């Protein structure tokens, strides 16, 4: 038997942590930070539900912080086992984790300097050094490669798109005459992505732990590069600067790719494009090293000598002073900076600088979780709190969902339609309640499958 416990990403989008107990071994699938509302963020400070030293292995579906960001805490508390992931995920974790630790330290320093934390003194959840300690435990594997995280358990990853290195996790028993398989979807990418391959089909699935981030919505089917061209051109005509909050890994590189394509087609003017995120710059280098993991179009363009992610006037901002200097740019430029939900990082300073000005434009291109500053701005609030102060929102606010790295519910359903058998049970995670419940309804109506919306700390026993 297998005991499956949902330790995070149940009833919310972030904090992915799923505990698998089988054959007297504990496997943790993903180990992410909670983000969004304060009630969620406070969970990061709670004691981990099990002794980290009792976990035998951790398996990561991809490198976003809500899936890997709690690793430094569990290692600091005693975890010493292997951390399995794809090679690209390992490379990305090598920059994401130290950066997350650095941001934790910077936020604590800023809170102490400005005195807006109720904790005296404010302390980081973990440090950059704590984050670097994690990297020695990473065990990279290739897509499709079999490995054994526990006795009589065969595991492998298959590509899901979403971001570079993302993969659904396939766990299968090897000691039964009727093998059982459980699949953890991680985050599902889209069938048509500017740079990534589409999700690979899954077969012989008995149990499925499925994300439901966009379980209640559909992406606009008529999205095209022309929509981004419109926003860029109108922003330039308005006489200000276009600011794009973007996840440092994935969306930043996709936006650079599409901007270059639009320039080549003459659909937008060549203007300075500032990539202001040390992590996004490092991720850009990793994308260049993993061209083989991109889609066929990108590989063909790369073979033709095209620099995939380089608009003509790309400016890479690395140092703090580089970032500060961008404040002197008053018009005719594009700033891409992290984080994508405006929860931290350099984007906060750019938003504080540009939000009050009516001539500027803010473009959101990804999901904005409940309780984040990005969601607050999209909801039309007149101001948003940053650095302990309310910043007025006067800039033009735009949103394009076509750049989302998450499949919508119809795309997820189409992926499940490719199963060669009906799964015995499905558990929905990684979605706000409305989205997860809507996704459950779609699955029941279309397939008549047994589907449950997971609850935090809930555990189920599965024949395995």
Image: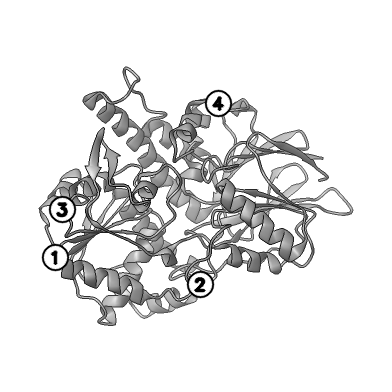
First-in-chain label (2 vs 3): 2
- Alpha carbon of mark 4 to alpha carbon of mark 2: how far? 41 Å
**C-alpha distance separating marks 2 and 3:** 34 Å
Residue closer to the observer: 219 or 141: 219
Residue 321: quarter of image: top left
Reading the image, the residue beneath label 3 is: 326
Crowd class of label 4 (few under 14; some 14 to 19; many from 20; radius 10 Å): few
Dot 1 or dot 3: first in sequence order is 1
Disc on res. 78: 4
Q: Between label 1 and label 3, give the one nearer the viewer.
A: 1
Q: Secondary structure at mark 4?
A: loop
Question: Which disc is residue 239 wearing?
Answer: 1
Mark 2 closeness class: few <14, some 14–19, many ≥20 residues within 10 Å = few
Q: Could you say where residue 96 lies in the image, as x and y percent from the top left?
A: 40, 45
Q: Residue at x 49, y 38 (%)?
A: 34
Q: Residues within 10 Å of mark 1 (few under 14, many from 20)?
A: some
Q: CA distance from mark 2 to mark 1?
A: 33 Å
Q: Is residue 184 visible?
A: yes
> Mark 3: which secondary structure?
helix
What is the CA distance from the residue labelled 1 to the residue labelled 3? 16 Å
> Which residue is painted at 36% across and 24% down in the image?
123
Image coordinates of residue 73 in percent, x first then y, are 49, 30
Observer-side mark, 1 or 4, equals 1
The residue at the far top in this view is 120
Q: Are marks 2 and 1 in contact (CB under 8 Å)?
A: no
Q: Is residue 420 above or below residue 102?
A: below
In the displayed structure, would residue 446 be above or below residue 150? below
């Amino acid at each position: 038997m297998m005991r499956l416990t949902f330790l995070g990403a149940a009833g919310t989008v972030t904090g992915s942590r799923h505990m698998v107990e089988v054959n007297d071994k504990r496997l943790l699938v993903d180990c992410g930070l909670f983000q969004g509302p304060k009630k969620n963020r406070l969970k990061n400070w709670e004691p981990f539900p099990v002794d980290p030293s009792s976990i035998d292995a951790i398996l990561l579906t991809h490198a976003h912080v809500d899936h890997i960001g709690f690793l430094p805490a569990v290692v600091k508390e005693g975890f010493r086992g292997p951390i399995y992931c794809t090679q690209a995920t390992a490379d990305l974790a090598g920059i994401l984790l130290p950066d997350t630790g650095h941001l934790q330290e910077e936020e604590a320093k800023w809170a102490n300097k400005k005195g807006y934390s109720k904790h005296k003194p404010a302390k980081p959840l973990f440090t950059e050094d704590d984050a670097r300690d994690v990297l020695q435990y990473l065990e990279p594997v290739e897509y499709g490669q079999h490995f054994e995280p526990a006795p009589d358990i065969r595991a492998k990853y298959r590509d899901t798109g979403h971001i570079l290195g993302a993969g659904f996790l396939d766990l299968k028993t090897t000691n039964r005459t009727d093998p059982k398989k459980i699949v953890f979807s991680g985050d599902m990418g889209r069938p048509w992505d500017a740079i990534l391959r589409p999700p690979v089909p899954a077969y012989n699935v008995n149990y499925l732990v499925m994300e439901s981030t966009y379980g209640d919505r559909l992406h606009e089917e008529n999205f095209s590069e022309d929509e981004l061209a419109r926003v860029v051109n109108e922003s330039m005509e308005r006489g200000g600067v276009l600011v794009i909050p973007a996840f440092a890994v994935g969306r930043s590189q996709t936006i650079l790719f599409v901007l270059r394509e639009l320039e080549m087609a003459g659909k937008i003017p060549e203007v300075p494009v500032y990539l202001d995120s040390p992590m996004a710059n490092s991720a850009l280098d990793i994308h260049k090293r993993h061209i083989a993991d991109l889609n066929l179009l990108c590989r063909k363009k790369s073979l033709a000598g095209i620099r995939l992610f380089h608009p003509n006037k790309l400016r890479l901002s690395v140092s703090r002073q580089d970032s500060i200097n961008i404040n002197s740019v008053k018009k005719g430029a594009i700033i891409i900076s992290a984080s994508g939900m405006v929860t931290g990082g350099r984007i906060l300073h750019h938003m504080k600088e540009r939000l009050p000005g009516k001539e500027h434009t803010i473009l959101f291109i990804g999901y904005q979780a409940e309780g984040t500053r990005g969601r607050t701005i999209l909801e039309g609030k007149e101001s948003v709190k940053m650095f302990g102060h309310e910043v007025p929102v006067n800039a033009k606010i735009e949103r394009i969902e076509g750049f989302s790295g998450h499949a919508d519910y119809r795309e997820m359903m189409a992926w499940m339609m490719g199963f060669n058998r009906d799964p015995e049970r499905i558990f929905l995670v990684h979605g706000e309640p409305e989205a997860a419940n809507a996704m459950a309804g779609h699955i029941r109506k279309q397939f008549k499958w047994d589907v449950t919306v997971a609850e935090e700390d809930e555990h189920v026993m599965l024949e395995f």
